[in-house]
Image: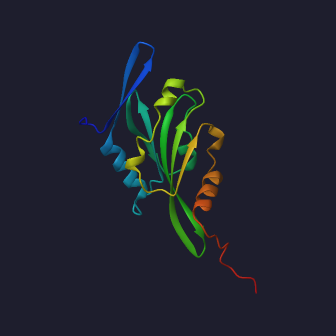
């Protein structure tokens, strides 16, 4: 374990060559951002965690979905954690979604290195998505996935008389 957080080692063998690929996590900053998104007393709705070399850091936090969507580039790998309000006029509740992003321009080795490294820090979410296309970043898609995971759906709560 490093001072900055956890390290994960992977050995990739390609013939006689070996490459040690260590990923470290800025555990405290990531946990802080996670708690900020989860807090009822915070306006923060999302956080994004990206690779800076072999180090994963909290790269951004915010309140608008469009700003969240802008954080994921075609040549990047990242994780996102987002809070969305779900329910109807009779039952409002916050739901959380965790996503793993691997952009379409990410190379094979970097794709292979992606794992659930951040997952253990963010254990409370209703849905986990793995996205590879920026067109999948639609709030309606996220809401639909959360609705499916939520079980019973009773409509608007208004009865026809």
Where's residue 20, x and y in %? 36, 23
From the viewer's side, name the closer residue of 102 and 137. Answer: 102
From the viewer's side, name the closer residue of 41 and 136. Answer: 136
Quadrant position of residue 158: bottom right
Q: How many marks?
A: 0
Question: Considering the image in quadrants, where does the C terminus appear?
Answer: bottom right
Q: Residue at x 52, y 45 (%)?
A: 99
Q: Is residue 78 above or below residue 156?
A: above
Question: Considering the image in quadrants, where does the N terminus appear?
Answer: top left
From the viewer's side, name the closer residue of 49 and 22. Answer: 22
Specify the farthest residue to the front.
15
Where's residue 58, x and y in %? 40, 41
Quadrant position of residue 41: bottom left
Specify the farthest residue to the top.
16
Quadrant position of residue 105: top right
Q: Residue at x 39, y 35 (%)?
A: 56
Q: Is residue 112 above or below residue 43?
A: above
Where's residue 82, x and y in %? 50, 52
Q: Residue at x 48, y 41 (%)?
A: 79
């Amino acid at each position: 374990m490093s001072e900055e957080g956890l390290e994960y080692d992977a050995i990739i063998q390609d013939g006689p060559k070996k490459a040690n690929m260590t990923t470290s996590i800025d555990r405290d900053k990531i946990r802080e951002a996670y708690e900020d998104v989860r807090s009822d007393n915070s306006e923060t709705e999302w956080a994004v965690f990206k690779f800076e070399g072999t180090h994963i850091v909290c790269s951004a936090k915010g309140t608008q979905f469009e700003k969240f969507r802008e954080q994921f580039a075609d040549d990047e790998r990242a994780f996102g954690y987002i809070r969305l309000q779900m329910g109807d006029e009779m039952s409002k509740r916050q739901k959380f979604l965790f996503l793993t992003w691997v952009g379409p321009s990410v190379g094979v080795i970097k794709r292979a290195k992606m794992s659930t490294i951040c997952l253990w820090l963010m254990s409370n979410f209703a849905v986990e998505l793995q996205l590879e296309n920026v067109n999948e970043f639609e709030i309606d898609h996220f809401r639909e996935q959360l609705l499916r995971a939520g079980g019973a759906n009773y409509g608007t709560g208004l009865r026809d008389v």
